Image: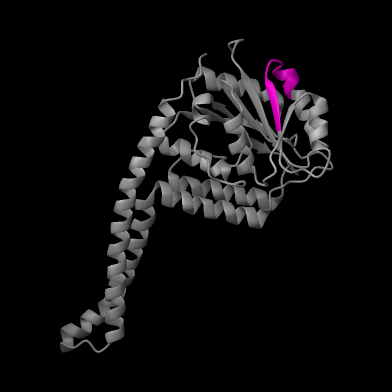
């Protein structure tokens, strides 16, 4: 690693007074030249004081939500390499060196720490189940090989950070980052990292049901924004298939008698067929718009200078 290279440790946290100091100390030992930023997201305990005492630069983000914090971090901090890590002591600061070296040696834009294995008691069963479901759903919708899109341990290049148009507000920010890299075809890699239980007194901010619903909704929105032809093409095919099934007995009756006795069904079939054509047209139009947006994102990405090794 180039000694002149500036590394920034970005730690979003809320009410982590029992864990933030060990996290900061761990990174100080592992990366003594790195600048550590703690973004306090409206904590009601002594998180900010503990972080400041440990030697971190503390910034307050009053708007609740991890997405708001990450957007603020990416806008405020200047560095060559960015390490984004949760402040709950579940990730090992010592592994950041290998993540950074992987990023630099591979000339990559992002290296994610895939949690493997998740040890007994490290997470609630609902979180584990939801994580598996969302990873499979993501691969189905976006075709990426990410195995852990919700990890809280990532390393970024300056080029990605400064060209990422974040819009998420909560924990769905991880999904947005993954979709962004997949959409632009950016060079990324996953590296297995250890994942420990939360220390006693620390509680997860992730709400299984409500945040899970938000992540699922974010995936659908991102699918509409990034792969509209797949979404609306699927709807078009569904309506067309339903209309075809409904039309079979109607056509058979017409062939036998020359009459169409079930007029409401015929009207329904016509309506479904029209909707199918409309969805197909909408998908084609939005697909063209999306390609233009991708080109603009790509140009913004290329305008940022690469991280020099």
Q: Tell me what residue is drawn at x 62 percent, y 47 percent.
A: 170
Residue 35 visible in this rendered orientation of the protein: yes
Which quadrant holds residue 33?
top right
* Coloring scheme used: one colour
Farthest residue, direction top: 3
**Residue occupying image coordinates x 30% and y 65%:** 276
Q: Is residue 95 left or right of residue 161?
A: right
Q: Position of residue 285 (x, y in %)?
A: 30, 52
Estimate the x, y position of residue 102 in percent, counting from the top left.
Answer: 55, 21
Q: Nearer the viewer, residue 102 or 204?
A: 204
Q: Quadrant of residue 239?
A: bottom left
Q: Which residues are magenta?
A: 27-38
**In magenta segment, residue 304:** no
In this rendering, the answer to whether 65 lies above or below 78 is: below
Say left or right for 144 vs 14: left
Is 202 placed left or right of 276 in the picture?
A: right
- Residue 189 in sight: no
Q: Is residue 256 above or below residue 58?
A: below
Find residue 89 and report its horizontal and vertical position in percent.
Answer: 75, 34
Q: Quadrant of the N terminus?
A: top right
Q: Residue at the spot x=36%, y=45% of the render?
A: 290
Could you tell me residue 219's position as x and y percent?
Answer: 50, 50
Direction from residue 117 to residue 49 in the image, left or right: right
The answer to which of 144 and 183 lies nearer the viewer is 183
Q: Quadrant of residue 73?
A: top right
């Amino acid at each position: 690693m180039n000694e002149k290279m500036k590394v920034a440790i970005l730690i979003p946290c809320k009410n982590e007074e029992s864990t933030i100091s060990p996290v900061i100390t761990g990174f100080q030992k592992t990366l003594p030249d790195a600048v550590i930023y703690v973004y306090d997201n409206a904590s009601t305990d002594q998180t900010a004081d503990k972080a400041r005492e440990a030697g971190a630069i503390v910034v307050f983000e009053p708007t609740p939500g991890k997405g708001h914090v990450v957007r603020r971090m990416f806008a405020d901090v200047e560095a060559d390499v960015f390490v984004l890590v949760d402040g709950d002591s579940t990730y090992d600061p010592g592994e950041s060196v290998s993540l950074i070296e992987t990023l630099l040696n591979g000339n990559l834009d992002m290296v994610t720490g895939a949690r493997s294995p998740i040890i007994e008691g490290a997470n609630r069963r609902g979180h584990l189940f939801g994580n598996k479901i969302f990873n499979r759903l993501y691969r189905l919708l976006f075709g990426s090989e990410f195995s852990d899109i919700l990890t809280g341990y990532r390393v970024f290049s300056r080029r990605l950070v400064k060209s990422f148009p974040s819009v998420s507000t909560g924990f769905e920010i991880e999904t947005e980052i993954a979709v962004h890299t997949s959409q632009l075809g950016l060079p990324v890699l996953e590296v297995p990292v250890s994942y420990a239980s939360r220390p006693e007194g620390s509680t997860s901010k992730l709400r299984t049901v409500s945040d899970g619903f938000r992540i699922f909704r974010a995936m659908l929105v991102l699918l509409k924004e990034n792969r509209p032809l797949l979404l609306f093409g699927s709807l078009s095919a569904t309506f067309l298939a339903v209309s075809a099934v409904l039309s079979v007995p109607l056509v058979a009756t017409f062939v036998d008698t020359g009459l169409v006795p079930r007029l409401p069904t015929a009207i329904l079939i016509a309506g479904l067929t029209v909707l199918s054509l409309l969805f197909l047209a909408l998908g084609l139009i939005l697909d063209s718009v999306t390609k233009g947006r991708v080109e603009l994102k790509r140009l913004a990405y290329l305008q940022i200078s690469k991280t020099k090794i």
